[in-house]
Amino acid sequence: MDPQLRSLDLSLPGRGVRPERLSDIKEARAWFTSEHTALLATVRRARAAGLDKTCWQLAYALKTFLCWGGHWEDWVTAQTVALEAAERMGDTSAQAQAHRSLAAALDWSVPDVDAQTHLRQALHLFTAEKDVLGQADVHLDLAGRYERQERPQDALHHNEQALALYRCVGDRGGEAKALNNVGYFKALFGDYDEALALCDAARQVFEELGDRRSLALTWDSVGVVHQQTGDLTRAAQCFRRAAEGCREVGSRYHEADSLDRLGDVELAAGHTRTARDAWQRAWDLLTELQHDGAAAVRLKLERSARPSDTAFDAWPAFGEPSARLERLTPMDRDGAAEPQRGKEVECR
């Protein structure tokens, strides 16, 4: 699913074991979905059987599917078990990976928990192992946390540190991720020409590597640049491409995030119905994911309703009316607060 996920040093399959052959991301998603419960049970059974290496490696291999699909509580459970297994093994590299993955999982499922402690420990262990690539990955994660804390200068600083480290080891995919992130922040600081150049450089690498999710996130960043400069038509085109790309690979939160931004620019362009269609789809996704961001999108839907509308089910919506929207009452909508917007930490 993720062409940039680090490969693992796996043991040879046992006698009679025949690995599945999956031809593309669609087949991979389908396989993970059908085997989801069994795979999580296998992580637990591996721990119980003392198969620590198998336990942490399986949990590591599951993280992309669990993150992109919004199975964040399962992700926390699997990574907690993986960290325990890595500590029992005394494997510093495995511990660093587990700390980093657990930090990301906690960020998605329990935002109030101090996941930064795990990131700092991961950075310490990667440094001890002289693992420059691992250090770069953690700086990218730290940047995401600082952005959510509304500390853009610190976020930019860590993205630039990640960029330098990726270049040091020649990791083009990681370099492209950092370029995209730096471009995003350059746009927020008003340096639009440099932002577009950085994001375009990242886009070319992702296209070459076949990294469809990172490519979609880059289209989202380019959309932000055009939104900031007032080119609403181009911004809308970019956000649509981003949402479509995320939907194709099953990255559900980021699909919702791009749809939310699409609604913003469509409303600014005077296209209220199109904006509401985008927000409706974003709201449905975020509600399915039980993400706090659903409240902000719901508020936008309320504010964009016609003055005579008093209930959600009176509004035009994308496709069939959402059953969840129809069940909401005016009392349900009272006090909806709009949380901070920004890019959630990526699952890398």
Image (spheres, rainbow, N blue to C red):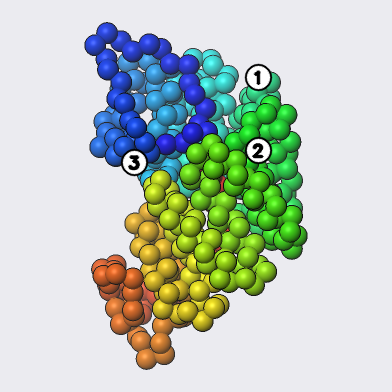
Tag in front: 3 or 1: 3
Q: Is residue 80 left or right of residue 172?
A: left
Q: Amino acid at mark 3?
A: Lys
50 or 186: nearer the eye?
Answer: 186
| Residue position for label 2 | 175
Disc 1, SS: loop
Residue with the mark numbered 3: 26
Three-letter code, disc 2: Glu
**Which of the two discs, 1 and 2, labels the residue nearer the N terminus?**
1
Tell me the residue at 51%/51% (across/down): 216
Residue carrying label 1? 129
Image quadrant assignment for residue 124: top right
Q: Is residue 132 above or below residue 71?
A: above
Residue 251: where, in percent of width, then height? 43, 48
Crowd class of label 2 (few under 14; some 14 to 19; many from 20; radius 10 Å): many
Q: CA distance from mark 2 to mark 3?
A: 26 Å
The disc, 3 or 1, on the residue closer to the chain's N-terminal end is 3
For discs 1 and 2, the disc positioned in front in the rendered view: 2
Picture coordinates of residue 156, whole percent (x, y): 71, 49
**SS at circle 3:** helix
Count up the numbered dots: 3
